């Protein structure tokens, strides 16, 4: 595992930190990411009414996976995370789906080593890949795209670094009106700058997911969506 991933995995594997982060995560109407999660489900449904297998990489408590499983009642899910604490919470929060969900422990840069199956109709990730450098991010996209069946969806809802310092200043000035800052106990270190929009778009293309777009963006968070060529 590359050093940057190892450092991030160690942070999230700390039970006290993971519990503090989960406790501060917005719920219900306060969770502004419910909209892009719903958009992702609607886009998948537009072309793929029966995705079959949905893989949630670094899925945390399973919020994103839950939206997709609600949208596709016949689908089954695999949730992968490096944190036992996160997986325990996901097992509780996703218990209503019963045997439709399989839980795996593992790092997002080693999907096959963690036993994540191939043939997925959608591979999701959320608020995790910003810990990766550009090359590591592209490696993740290549491996994730390799798990998809023809016409499958690669979806990533994550934080980015603005290219423009002017916009960075503007966003920092106004975003707290809409997204209150997290408690200091949930702050975590990044070994390098966050990936940019260009890093993500280039990663999709390098993975062979040429049909890609940014379906939603607010401040520092983007919903990247892409579909592999149909058979």
Image (cartoon, rainbow, N blue to C red):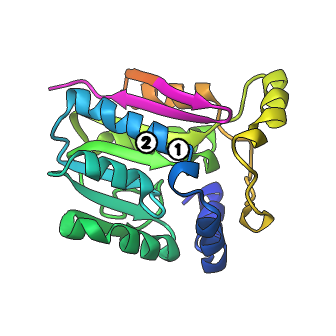
Which stretch is magenta? 214-231
Against 2, is 212 above or below?
above
For the N terminus, which image quadrant?
bottom right
Check disc 1 and report the residue beneath it: 33
Q: What is the crowding at mark 1: few (fewer than 14 residues within 10 Å), some, or many (at least 20)?
A: many
Tell me whether the residue at label 2 lies in contact with that at label 1, contact meaning CB atoms closer than 8 angstroms. Answer: yes
Kindly state the secondary structure of the residue where label 2 is placed.
helix
Q: Which residue is farthest front?
A: 29
Q: Quadrant of residue 48?
A: top left
Residue under the point 25% across and 24% down: 229
**Number of numbered tags placed on the structure image:** 2
Residue under the point 77% across and 42% down: 176
Residue under the point 40% across and 33% down: 39
The image position of residue 63, as x and y in percent, is 43, 56
The image position of residue 150, as x and y in percent, is 20, 32
Magenta span dominant secondary structure? strand
Against 177, is 64 above or below?
below
Instruction: Identify the mark at residue 86; answer none if there is no mark.
Output: none
Q: Quadrant of residue 13?
A: bottom right
Instruction: Identify the mark at residue 37; answer none if there is no mark.
Output: 2
The residue nearer to you, when weighing 165 against 105, is 165
The residue nearer to you, when weighing 130 against 135, is 130
Q: Is residue 71 left or right of residue 188?
A: left
Q: Quadrant of residue 160?
A: top right
Q: Is residue 223 left or right of residue 70?
A: right
């Amino acid at each position: 595992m590359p050093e940057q991933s190892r450092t991030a995995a160690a942070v999230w594997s700390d039970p006290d930190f993971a519990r503090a982060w989960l406790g501060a995560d917005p719920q219900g109407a306060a969770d502004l990411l419910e909209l892009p999660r719903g958009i992702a489900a609607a886009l998948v449904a537009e072309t793929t009414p029966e995705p079959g297998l949905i893989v949630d990489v670094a899925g945390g408590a399973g919020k994103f996976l839950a939206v997709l499983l609600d949208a596709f009642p016949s689908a089954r899910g695999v949730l992968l995370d490096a944190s036992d604490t996160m997986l325990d919470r996901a097992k509780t929060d996703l218990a209503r789906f019963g045997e439709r969900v399989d839980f795996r422990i593992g790092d997002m840069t080693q999907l096959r080593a963690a036993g994540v199956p191939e043939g997925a109709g959608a591979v999701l990730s959320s608020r995790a890949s910003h810990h990766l450098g550009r090359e590591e991010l592209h490696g993740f996209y290549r491996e994730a795209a390799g798990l998809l069946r023809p016409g499958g969806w690669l979806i990533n809802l994550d934080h980015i670094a603005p290219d423009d310092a002017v916009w960075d200043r503007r966003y920092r000035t106004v975003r707290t009106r809409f997204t209150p800052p997290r408690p200091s106990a949930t702050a975590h270190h990044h070994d390098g700058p966050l990936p940019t929009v260009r890093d993500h778009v280039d990663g999709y293309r390098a993975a062979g997911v040429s049909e890609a777009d940014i379906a939603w963006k607010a401040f520092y968070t983007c919903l990247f969506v892409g579909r592999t060529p149909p058979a």
